[in-house]
Amino acid sequence: MIIPIVVAFAAGLVGSVYQALKPPPPKICGSQNGPPLTLGRVKLNDGRHLAHREFGVPKEKAQHKIILSHGYNDSRHMHLAASQELMEKHNACIILHDRAGYGESDPYPSRSTKIEALDIEELTDKLELGKFYMFIGSTPRSFPDSSFRELLVAFHSTDFSKTVI
């Protein structure tokens, strides 16, 4: 008689502990119950969105277009030492983006460095930056940055219009 009561109590206790420890469902930015969007997002061909921020002169008027890729512990909100006046003086536009799963960009659980490189390439195409832009990785030897450099060399081996730093 006491064994079924103990088993039922233990099952209830395990269920309560599971409910207490289970993480809440993710809240994707821009979704119905998620946080609001604060800046621009670009829809990629596979349906995901990448968030980005422009700094400096508008990209349509900029002579120097720079894609700045953040490291693993940063986001598009990283601090830039360049002032707005400096950007206007040099007629430059810096575009910072959130990688998949960072900030307001949609998550992509099976991402790889190759996918991240293709995301950067697609972002530049969707933003219509043209043939001439610079790419700067903020973290030395970051895998996604290195993968993007390799992608540029493979795709544009005879076209040196895209500058990689």
Image: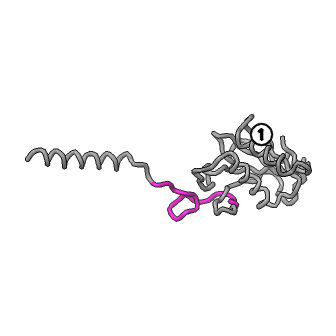
Q: Position of residue 9 (x, y in %)?
A: 19, 47
Main secondary structure of the magenta stretch? loop
Q: Locate residue 2: give its quadrant.
A: top left
Q: Nearer the viewer, residue 83 or 38?
A: 38
Q: Position of residue 163 (x, y in %)?
A: 87, 46
Which residue is situated farthest in the bottom direction here?
A: 32
Q: Locate residue 74: give its quadrant.
A: top right
Tell me if 46 is positioned left or right of 154 in this view.
Answer: left
Q: Position of residue 32 (x, y in %)?
A: 52, 65
Q: Is residue 126 above or below residue 91?
A: below
Badge 1 crowding class, 10 Å Cα cut-off, few under 14, some 14 to 19, many 20 or more, is few
Pointer 1: what residue?
81
| Image color mode | one colour
Tell me if 127 is positioned left or right of 41 in this view.
Answer: right
Based on the picture, tell me whether residue 30 belongs to the magenta stretch. Answer: yes
User: What is the three-letter code of the residue carrying label 1?
Assistant: Ala
For the point 84% across and 40% down, which residue is it?
165
For the point 69% across and 48% down, which residue is it?
76
For the point 64% across and 63% down, which residue is it?
47
Based on the picture, tell me whether residue 60 belongs to the magenta stretch. Answer: no
Q: Position of residue 46 (x, y in %)?
A: 66, 62
Q: Which residues are magenta?
A: 25-42
For the point 77% across and 39% down, which residue is it?
81
Tell me if 15 is positioned left or right of 106 in this view.
Answer: left
Q: SS at mark 1?
A: loop
